[in-house]
Amino acid sequence: MVDKSRVVCPACDSVNAVPTDRPAEAAKCGRCHAKLFQGEPVELNSVRLQKHLANSDLPVIVDFWAPWCGPCRAMAPIFERAAHDLEPKARFVKVNVDESPDAARKYGVQGIPALFAFRGGQIGARQAGVADFKTLKSWVDGLAA
């Protein structure tokens, strides 16, 4: 029996079972046929975030941000690099707190950028302010094990 990992499609939010013995980089959604890993952060709203957190076997790294926030703009290229370099070991998502204030409230975000690492829907790590690539990599390495 082949082990499978649940991965939520970044395009249509369908839950896919990806065999662990195949390269995840090539995996496509069974519903919409989009690549499951595109090497860039996925923009999510509150509802979509909950679906990804509840249905992903991968760590989900979340950047709560806003377009008017200077430190958030400084964090953006670091987060993009992490998504490019560390997928498919984790899913990287961005949540705009102006458009999804309920998600920010649910996780107690008081300042932005706020970075969270989830595994199995539970918070595994969190940090307020800009993080470096090394921090994000250590989160993924620790939660993907």
Image: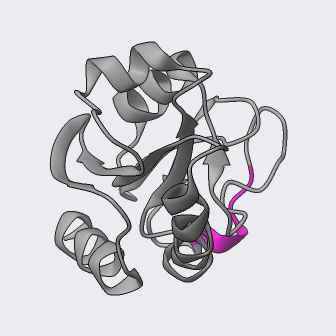
Which contiguous range is marked in magenta?
24-28
Would residue 26 be counted in the magenta stretch?
yes
Image coordinates of residue 110 in percent, x first then y, are 27, 33
Q: Quadrant of the C terminus?
A: bottom left
Q: Quadrant of the N terminus?
A: bottom left
Image coordinates of residue 6 in percent, x first then y, are 44, 43
Image coordinates of residue 57 in percent, x first then y, are 35, 47
Q: Is residue 19 visible?
A: yes
How is the model colour-coded? one colour
Q: Is residue 47 left or right of residue 41?
A: left
Q: Main secondary structure of the magenta part?
A: helix
**Outermost residue toward the right?**
33
Q: Is residue 93 left or right of residue 122?
A: right
Q: Is residue 114 left or right of residue 31?
A: left
Q: Quadrant of residue 111?
A: top left
- Residue beneath the point at 41% across and 21% down: 103
- Residue beneath the point at 49% across and 61% down: 71
Q: Of 82 and 59, which appears nearest the observer?
A: 82
Q: Is residue 16 visible?
A: no
Image coordinates of residue 137 in percent, x first then y, are 33, 79
Q: How many marks?
A: 0
Considering only vertical position in the picture, is 29 above or below 28?
Answer: above
- Residue beneath the point at 68% across and 69% down: 39
- Residue beneath the point at 58% across and 24% down: 98
Q: Is residue 74 left or right of residue 20?
A: right
Would residue 80 be counted in the magenta stretch?
no
